[in-house]
Amino acid sequence: MNQYAEDGTLVPGDYFMMGNFACVEAAIMAGCRFYAGYPITPSSEIFESASTRLPQVGGYAVEMEDEIASVAALIGASYAGAKVMTATSGPGFSLMMENIGLAYMMEAPLVIVNVQRAGPSTGIATLVGQGDMMQAKWGTHGDVETIVYCPNSVQEFFDLTIQAFNSAEKFRTPVFVMADQVVAMMWERLRIPGCGEIEVKQRDVLDPKVLSSQVPFDYSEDFLPMPIAGTGCRVNIDSLTHDSRGYPSIEHSVSETLTRHLVGKITGHAREIWKWEEFLLEDAEVAVVSYGCSSRSALRAVKIARSKGIKAGLLRLITPWPFPDEIIERVSSKVSTLVVAEINYGQLIHPIREHSRCPVVGANWAPGTLIDPSAILDALQVVVPS
Amino acid sequence: MTQSIFPVGGPEIKTKSHQWDPLIRSERYPNIWCPGCGIGIVLSSYINAVHKSSIPAEKHICICGIGCTGRVSGYLNLDSYHTTHGRGIAFATGMSVIRPDLEITVVAGDGDISTIGGNHLIHAARRNTDLNVIMVNNLNYGMTGGQHGATTPLGARTHTSPYGNVESPFNVPYLVSAAGASFVARWTTIHVRQLLRAIKRMMEIEGFAFLEVVSPCPPTFGEFNNYPEALDMMNYFRDKSVVDNDADLRDITITARPEDPIVVGNFVDRRRPSYQELLSGLHEKSSDKSARGGPNH
């Protein structure tokens, strides 16, 4: 049984929990008080749990008519001052793209969890995939830069959900937790840290008094305080390209300034966003690059390869976007080949190849299951003949 | 009292000050609307209602979608949000759940509210979300140059129905009433006093309040359908509007036949619990330890 404190949060300690439930507990600890969703497998436990848990902490979980409405409602609630999230899977993620673009443009902090499943279109709702990795970056139209976290365990699903809220608030942007069916439905040990151990970023809110002497959007700054509805700011928040006053404009310089701001506030701070993990790379001759649940198969494959005398290592990407180009450049300059293991027919392999100093091959697998470590091992044995 | 206005890219304009000035972003004028457009009448009716309401201006929120009517929020000196096409009601739903104390009004066109956003419209009416929705119905897509939508009368001509529209339109007040709205009205842009009264009433209603404003669009819908001049459609509204607050809503579809009436009125004004009222009740229910929670709780 879960133990709850007076304020409704989980009592610190060790629990045995499913990834989807851990995600909700993390969101609550990060301050999330609004969830708008539409049921979809394999993310539904997040919505169900949010529906039970958020009212207990004074929050709201509402069911919208579709995922388009879910994200629109998140942005509205975000501008009302709440920390907000939703969760979905591939088909819902596709529907969300329109208003994800609106969230970028309105600089609304929100967290979207995508529990990736198998296949295009409806695909296989109950099986695993990693086929939405490029969509997370390129799914909405126009130039944007994005922040994505990829957990590979229940504990990390918890930790990165809190991190996603903190990044959303700091960068005033939608942030994605690209989980997958395996991580989301797996039950594992979860350590809930004490409140003092969790860093929670509070929103930087615009004081309406400053508007008598300054514009609401000073794009010379990367991080701008957010005008909250009903606090007297009376600012125009626009989906159209807008100037420093928030007014629509078709001036070339306005478009340049705004788009550079939206992209630059993230790319300019990429090094502080990047998270990755290295395993046995010190003396490696070949490196596997992987993320999410696939990285668990990759770790197994690397260990078997080592037992066979192949000097293999693992680079696990925790933040595939903004793309960690410097890390790929560094690791790829010390090995003969990179093997990219992912549950799709080649997605993150493309930016990896773009930045790699050595040849890159894919260990691709997408029948709806975890990658069999032997498939990665086969690729390692091909590139490093014994 | 006079004041100077500095429109974007234009010369200084000296004008008499007006009691509504604090509610308008006058530096954004002139507005983008065509001569003869009815949206300005809807804008002024809304401003007048905000001005006369007992709710302070900083608690009034205007949320718009995309299209000609979508530009309304940008001219208002309020917290204003110009969202995506059709999604204003969904956006407003999230905001109103977190801040039920705000007086949120969604103003958008017929294509926005009833066509691309039709799903959000009926579900907000079903939930009885405490919002005001003003749908300016100019019977076509104006900003994109005049195409037919879900409100274009059967047989009417537009750029995408050059031989006459083969789709029957939504009778939106009937639709929204059936879905459960607390307040439903239809007026035209010639009914300025009735518009003001309706919008003021919507701001008092605790629940989903919907107003359709039939509005002229001389350069596109008008040009195609024998109302090419600014006054043509206003004359049609004056001559053919029939006020009937007790109308059978099944019978008030707007047609393309100039001899048919436009039935207007405050059709529905009823009370049932709003979405926000029911949602806030969940906090108490969820604190009852004996209540059954979801899985894993």
Image (tube, coloured by chain):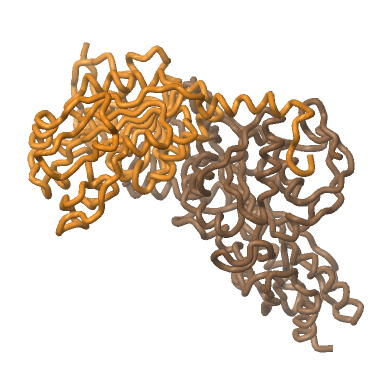
Chain colours: A brown, B orange
- Residue A316 falls in image quadrant: bottom right
- The relative height of residue A90 versus residue A82 in the rendered view (above or below) is below
Q: Is residue B231 left or right of residue A186?
A: left
Q: Residue at x 55, y 59 (%)?
A: A91
Q: In the rendered image, which quarter contains the N terminus of chain A?
A: top right
Whether residue A23 is visible to the viewer of this picture, yes or no, is yes
- Residue A111 falls in image quadrant: top right
- The relative height of residue A203 versus residue B139 in the rendered view (above or below) is above
Q: Nearer the viewer, residue B184 or B131?
A: B184
Q: Residue at x 43, y 33 (%)?
A: B180
Q: Residue at x 18, y 43 (%)?
A: B255
Return the x and y of residue A243 as percentages of the image width and height. 39, 39
Q: Is residue A34 left or right of residue A95?
A: right
Return the x and y of residue B100 as percentages of the image width and height. 52, 24
Outermost residue, bottom side: A386
Whether residue A236 is visible to the viewer of this picture, yes or no, is no
Q: Nearer the viewer, residue A318 or B12?
A: A318
Q: Nearer the viewer, residue A277 or B250?
A: B250
Q: Nearer the viewer, residue A140 or A122?
A: A122
- The relative height of residue A169 versus residue A182 in the rendered view (above or below) is above
Return the x and y of residue B107 as percentages of the image width and height. 34, 33
- Residue A201 falls in image quadrant: top right
